[in-house]
Image (spheres, rainbow, N blue to C red):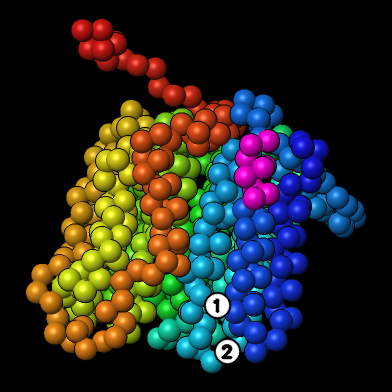
Amino acid sequence: MSDFPFLSVLTVAPLVGAVVVALLPRSRPTLAKQVAFGWSLLVLALSVVMWVTFQVGGDRFQFRESYPWIPNWGVNFTFAADGIALVMLMLIAVLVPLVILASWHDAESSKRSIPVYFALLLVLECTMIGVFAAADVFLFYVFFEVMLVPMYFLIGSYGGHQRQYAAVKFFLYSLVGGLFMLAAVIGLWVVGGKTFDWVALSQVDISTGAERWLFLGFFVAFAIKAPFFPFHTWLPDAGGAAPAGAAALLVGVLDKVGTFGILRYCLPLFPDAAQWFAPWALALAVIGIIYAALLAVGQNDLKRLVSYTSIAHFGFIGVGIFAFTTQAGTGAVLYMVNHGLATGLLFLVVGMLIARRGSALVSDFGGAGKLVPVLAGVLFFAGLASLALPGTAPFVSEFLVLIGTFTVNKPVAVIATLGIILAAAYVLWMVQRTTQGTLNPALTEIDGMKRDLNLREKVVVAPLIALILVLGFYPKPVTDVINPAIQATMQDVGRTDPAPSVDTVQEASR
């Protein structure tokens, strides 16, 4: 099975499914949903086989494929996956079927084509898989840009309040970032011997000045995509306007392209520049943790609140990346996975709550747990996972980031820890105002608030809850896959973990 073209098949399969779904008549919306869901399950099954086939401790990049595309420019359809890409591909494969199932009725109120909506979700899956699987810089750039198109239409055509404004803002921010990357890609091609192959480029010796400019071009694009402070302002608008399922993919997976890009391209290709810019990147990450958490506390819109929490979480990921330790780096990648699970669950549950109430405003709820106790309980669990409660998966990744950072940069680790306190504030405030306390009399008059989780919704949340708990107590299967890739990345940067001090050794021996 190691010779099977997993990555190209995984990339193309959702696109074929999208064409099939889009061609179904508008009069058969249920069939379109069923075909899209079934197709996403096939992608999940193939991804599981790929995960099992991956050899932990084997070659850094596996499942490599390369097909000529534009020979004169040195461009190829080259795919390969290391442990970092593999865990992100599995996250996509897990989330998309659940999002399709959770979005069963999302497009019905838009008066637009339901088959097209689910076809767009499959197109988005295709582009997300492609961007993580690409091992050719130009191919990565193409997927990076094309990925904007399905999300733009999901927000602009099927979103809620101010959807067109949010869609345009999302597209323009990402497009500007893409222009910075395009300039850097061209510059890299020139100084790298007219090739876009990642392996070849990683061995090129670049002058200090050129390396810093190229790093900056890639970093700005990835910082906007993630987003890091101060490039974050598009996310609350896009997350607030997007349908809940699309928002779960936007925050749970799409934004991870930014942090993945830093790990895959900025650090290995420009190691000296990465170390030179690291203090600035750490500063932006720490500011983002505190600033976004403070803004989240004051939000009255549920989806905007969750979006701001994600900006704070991306700050933790940034700290883990630029601490340049194996523990922090592994924690950062694990955080990318766990954040996708926890925030994906939170967005989906918030979407279920909003669909019942017909409003996303926290002030329109109050005591909802008395009417929908199971839904309220799942919201509470998702909130606790989001604030990294011990026993949930995000706690492990947050702990690794902080302990790995503390060994090399104590002030950054201490300041970042304040974000945990603020996270407890905004999560508990949200849960208290929406599901606890005195029942809002207006809720008793709304039919939707009289229906707790149905079977379809339970099927959506159950796998995510299970994964959050399992990875909270036993993350080893994932960290074993991540660790070799992070160690190789640290070697590319030329950084090693600090040796334990004499005092630490003596303390441990007592």
Q: Amino acid at mark 2?
A: Arg
> Is 171 positioned to the left or the right of 239 in the image?
right
Q: Mark 2 sits on what residue?
A: 112
**Residue 33: image location, x then y, percent:** 60, 74
**Residue 96: image location, x then y, percent:** 55, 61
**Residue 270: image location, x then y, percent:** 60, 41
Contact, CB < 8 Å: mark 1 with mark 2? Answer: no
Residue at point 21%, 83% (across, down): 443
Residue positioned most to the right: 72
Q: Nearer the viewer, mark 1 or mark 2?
A: 2
Which type of secondary structure does the marked residue at label 2 adopt? Answer: loop
Residue at point 71%, 68% (across, down): 17
Per the image, is 125 magenta?
no
Q: Amino acid at mark 1?
A: Leu
Instruction: Give the vertical position of 175 relative to 499 (above or below).
Output: below
Give the CA distance from mark 1 to mark 2: 11 Å
Nearer-N-terminus badge (1/2):
2
> Is 132 positioned to the left or the right of 3 in the image?
left
Q: Is residue 258 visible?
A: no
Residue at point 74%, 74% (across, down): 20
Q: Nearer the viewer, residue 448 or 455?
A: 455
* Range drawn in magenta: 45-53
User: Where's the C terminus, which quadrant?
Assistant: top left
**Residue 50: image location, x then y, percent:** 67, 42
Q: Nearer the viewer, residue 252 or 275?
A: 252
Residue positioned most to the left: 438
Residue 53 figure quarter: top right
Q: Mark 1 sits on what residue?
A: 154
Q: Nearer the viewer, residue 26 or 236?
A: 26
User: Where's the N terminus, which quadrant?
Assistant: top right
